[in-house]
Image: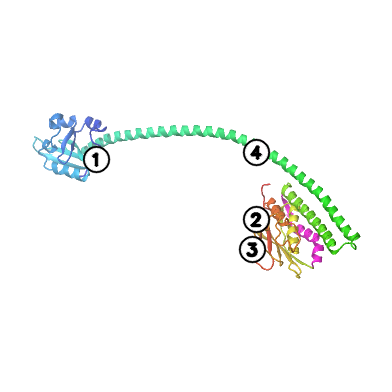
Amino acid sequence: MAAQSAEVSTPHDSASFFLRSAPSPMAATEGMRHLVTFANAAFCELVATSSEQLIGRPFCELVPNMHECATLLSRVYCSGIPERHTEQLFFRPAPVFWSFGIWPVIAHARPVGIVIQVTETADFHEMTVAMNEALVLGSLRQHELTEAADASNAQLREEIGVRERTEEALHRTQAALSEHTGELEGLVAERTSELTSTNQQLEAFVYSIAHDLRAPLRAMQGFSELLVEEAGAALSETGKSYANRISKSAQFMDALLCDLLAFSRISQRHVVLSSVSLEKVVSAVLIRLQATIQEKNASVECSGPWPSVLAHESTLSQVVFNLTSNALKFARPGVAPCVRLRAEERAQFVRVWVEDEGVGIRSDHRDQIFRLFTRLNGEKYPGTGIGLAIVQKGVERMGGSVGVELDRQPGSRFWFELRKADVLVDQ
């Protein structure tokens, strides 16, 4: 009958204490010859032989009347599977049962010996043998579990120590970080104050310079026109050409200063977003451009609906004005401008389109048109090259985006997107 499976350590290790003190006879062997390496007091008493006389002898010599002993030990040793064997002996006055519980001793994943428990009883019962086996296995496992528990407790104490040291280091780091954060906040506040002051001074300087420069420019323009009017007959064609070029240069410089001031204002002004009616802004822009529209015999189409957007009204008006005036200005020679303004809703945004059928924009100029002082058709069309830079800056200040589609020829399709008025954002 097979015994309960168990893997035990050699009796020379820490478990030997339990084998020596076990009340049941216990012995241990090693090797294929099953030479006895250990026998507890109960076993010595059973075979009536001292421990010194037993050590080194084959186990089967100690129980010569056990017919299957050698075969049984060899089978357990080779298979590594524990077994139980019971045999009745008749060499005593009364029948005696010997029950053997045999377990392999495992070292480095292979059997190296045998541990044997012998139970002798005149009135054999299976329950008695099973209880003895359970007691032995319990004794062996108890010490193994105690050692494992001690190791686990030591590891747990080490982990607790590491955690305590980590928490202490974390507290120190947090304290240092808090102190450093306070220093950074103070530094940021100081730098912000300095930057605000610098921007204010720069803005005042720009306005002052622009005012001081525009005065002589207007004088140059006025005097050159007076020169042509009063001394026109005395001037040669070349002289008249020079005077006209002076006037046009002064006009261009004045327009350039005005656009630079507009760009500075749109970059520096405090922008507070609110609900703005696109329909109101577009109508106001078209009224401002009415003279230009009539002069160029242009057609302007507005297709609604025009929802309200989250914007800054004067900045939005500047954006729509610049895009629409560009569409009117860059018309093909001999062709009346045709401009279309429309809006479409896209999730949380509203996209406004300004489309024309003018000279268009080359695809390799896409990345240049929103830069300052970019004049792609400066020889044929007037302008300072700042209008689209103002458009981009204004849309960005309002939290939107701007772009151009070059999928149609002739003409161009500019667009900008702003959030719907019912979409809340942090100011």
Q: Which residues are magenta?
A: 271-296
Residue labelled with disc 2? 348
Type of amino acid under label 4: Val
Q: Earlier in the sequence, mark 3 or mark 2?
A: 2
Q: Earlier in the sequence, mark 4 or mark 2?
A: 4
Residue labelled with disc 1? 106
Q: Is residue 266 above or below residue 28?
A: below
Residue labelled with disc 3? 363
How far is mark 4 from mark 1, CA to CA? Answer: 71 Å
How far is mark 1 from mark 3, CA to CA? Answer: 81 Å
Dot 2: element? loop
Front residue of this view, candidates 301 and 132: 301
Dot 3: element? helix
Pick the quarter of the image with the N terminus.
top left
| Callout 2 crowding tier (Cα within 10 Å): few <14, some 14–19, many ≥20 | few
Type of amino acid under label 2: Gln
